[in-house]
Image (cartoon, grey):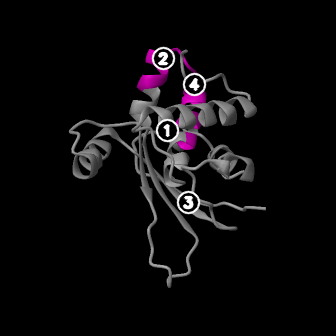
Amino acid sequence: MTTLHLDIENASAIADKDLPSEDELKLWASACLAPKHMMSTQASTPSENPNLSIRIVDEDESQTLNNQYRHKDAPTNVLSFPCDLPPEVELDLLGDLVICAQVVAREALAQGKSVRAHWAHMVIHGCLHLLGFDHIKDEAAEEMEALETTILTALDFPPPYER
């Protein structure tokens, strides 16, 4: 059984009371680590006790990081930074997620979703990236989107993608 250790930092101007709780973030991230989701050719197997860091930021920091790491000069909803330690370093680090609270709220409104549902989607989407999933090629995107939909609907959220 996988036990996720979660470190959360709210570096945004959004009050903690207006953000998902630690329990919600942990539930959503942990849902990605279920062994049944690791049958994909894209996925890497997480350790028994992975550590995940989630930093909640404002648009300025999101834009700076998105520009620095993806060469896109705009804030974005979630950035994933997988941990890539040498084999001799025995730490169970899954990686880091950086989530922009304002972008998530704005996208939820534009997409007609609840903010909570969109937060869950962004955490799951980011965690799947940390596990090796991507959406660069159509086939990989279809697999990742199907898995996101499976996980989110199992958590009683509506499917995240319009079909």
Q: Label 4: how many residues lie within 10 Å, few (<14), some (14-19) or many (20+)?
A: some
Q: Earlier in the sequence, mark 3 or mark 4?
A: 3
Residue at (51, 38) in percent of width and height: 122
Q: Amino acid at mark 4?
A: Pro
The one nearer the camera, 139 or 6, is: 139
Residue underneath mark 2 = 111
Q: Label 1: how many residues lie within 10 Å, few (<14), some (14-19) or many (20+)?
A: some
- Find numbered disc 1 in the image and state the secondary structure of the residue it sits on: helix
> Principal SS element in the magenta part?
helix
Q: Position of residue 52 (x, y in %)?
A: 55, 60
Q: Are marks 1 and 2 in contact (CB under 8 Å)?
A: no
The circle on residue 140 is 1
| Label 1 vs label 2, nearer the camera | 1
Q: Amino acid at mark 2?
A: Gln
The circle on residue 52 is 3
Q: Earlier in the sequence, mark 1 or mark 2?
A: 2
Q: Amino acid at mark 3?
A: Leu
Which image quarter: residue 46?
bottom right
Q: CA distance from mark 4 to mark 1?
A: 17 Å
